[in-house]
């Protein structure tokens, strides 16, 4: 393929690793910053590009939390959520599991019921008005410790919104061991939620093993270091445990030194179920279409190969079986029509 982007732009897609606040466009971040002028976040959308240039993962977390601090009212939550869905619709994303960190909002004074109502109102509007199906992953912010884990688990169980499907763990990995969160994942799993922690982004493969064996992960967020352990790759491939790969994110946070060194090739060569995602797209100056373009180049994919990559995300999603069939068929139909040529 000389240029995969026109094909990718129209391709129906699912996204499995994308953060609620990290998906706020410069326009929305600037609008929220203007609403809350005590923040250090720039109110000029153009100035945000410099603000979102990270020196390392710790700096990224600091900047991320400064944007989190802009979401202070239920109206802010609703605006952010619906605008994220609008961006997804522009990219032909049909289904997304959006990682939401309710603790970050409730600790800032947003009533928990009002928070749930805001995301659910936006979810229903997004499906009705934009054709984008949103589901939630409630995420423990690892940097906030076990208090945040306990509160996130309580909110997931006691205030469970209709769209909630999974339970995750994000934030820094260094110094934040996965096993300490076992009781909270056990509680969430007992309530029927899926386990999807981040692991192996900035630490070694043992973190991924801990996520699998202790937190009973069904998918792994990032899993970048998994390629350092052949037995781990074999385990992931054998059990069809998907990796949620986010190429540009890994470069932006310095988890990977150079895009040409990204381990996605080794993951695919080992037979691992790889999905492509944008993580915090606007903070990293990317979107899901761009990430597919990067993956297509690194993996040497043609249109059919890109379509199969899109179907990986459908397979690894927590959609119901009928929903998976519909989206996979939509991808196949789009691809067949594209390859026929003249109709496009």
Image (cartoon, grey):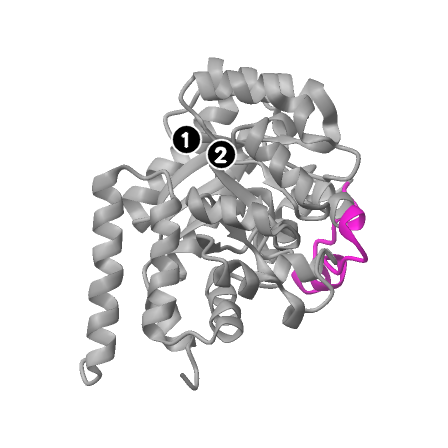
Residue that label 1 marks: 165
Residue 215, relative to residue 322: is it above or below?
above
User: Which sits earlier in the primary sequence, circle 2 or circle 1?
Assistant: 2
Residue that label 2 marks: 137
Determine crowd level at label 1: few under 14, some 14-19, many 20+ residues with C-alpha closer than 10 A.
many
Residue 48, relative to residue 101: is it above or below?
below
- Front in this rendered view, residue 115 or 250: 250
User: Which residue is pictured at 74% across the width and 44% down the height?
Assistant: 61
**Residue 57 lies in the magenta stretch:** yes
The magenta stretch is 39-59
Q: Position of residue 124 (x, y in %)?
A: 34, 36
Q: Position of residue 319 (x, y in %)?
A: 32, 39
Q: SS at mark 2?
A: strand
- Front in this rendered view, residue 70 or 4: 4
Residue 219, relative to residue 289: is it above or below?
above
Q: Tell me the quadrant of the picture where the N terminus can be found.
A: bottom left
- Front in this rendered view, residue 205 or 22: 205
Q: Position of residue 145 (x, y in %)?
A: 73, 24
């Amino acid at each position: 393929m000389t240029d995969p982007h026109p094909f990718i732009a129209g391709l129906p897609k699912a996204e499995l690793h994308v953060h609620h606040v990290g998906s706020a466009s410069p326009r929305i971040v600037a609008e929220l910053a203007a609403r809350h002028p005590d923040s250090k976040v720039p109110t000029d959308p153009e100035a945000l590009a410099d603000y979102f240039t990270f020196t390392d993962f710790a700096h990224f977390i600091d900047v991320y939390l400064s944007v989190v601090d802009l979401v202070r009212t239920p109206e802010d939550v609703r605006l952010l959520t619906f605008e994220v869905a609008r961006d997804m619709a522009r990219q032909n994303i049909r289904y997304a599991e959006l990682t939401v960190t309710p603790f970050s909002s409730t600790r800032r004074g947003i009533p928990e019921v009002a928070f749930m109502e805001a995301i659910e109102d936006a979810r229903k509007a997004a499906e009705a008005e934009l054709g984008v199906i949103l589901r939630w992953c409630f995420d423990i912010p690892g940097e906030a410790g076990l208090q945040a884990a306990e509160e996130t688990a309580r909110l997931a169980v006691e205030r469970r919104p209709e769209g909630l499907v999974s339970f995750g763990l994000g934030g820094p990995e260094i110094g934040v061991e996965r096993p300490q969160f076992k009781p909270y994942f056990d509680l969430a799993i007992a309530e029927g939620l899926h386990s999807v922690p981040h692991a192996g982004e900035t630490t070694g493969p043992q973190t991924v093993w801990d996520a699998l064996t202790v937190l009973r992960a069904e998918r792994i967020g990032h899993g970048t270091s998994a390629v350092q352990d052949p037995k781990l790759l074999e385990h992931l491939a054998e059990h069809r445990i998907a990796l949620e790969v986010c190429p540009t994110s890994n470069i932006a946070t310095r988890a990977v030194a150079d895009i040409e060194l990204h381990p996605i090739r080794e993951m695919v060569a080992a037979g691992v179920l790889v999905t492509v995602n944008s993580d915090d797209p606007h903070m990293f100056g990317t979107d899901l279409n761009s990430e597919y373009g990067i993956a297509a180049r690194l993996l040497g994919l043609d249109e059919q190969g890109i379509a199969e990559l899109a179907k990986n995300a459908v397979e690894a999603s927590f959609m119901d079986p009928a929903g998976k069939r519909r989206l996979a068929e939509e991808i196949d139909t789009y691809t067949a029509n594209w390859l026929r040529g003249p109709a496009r």
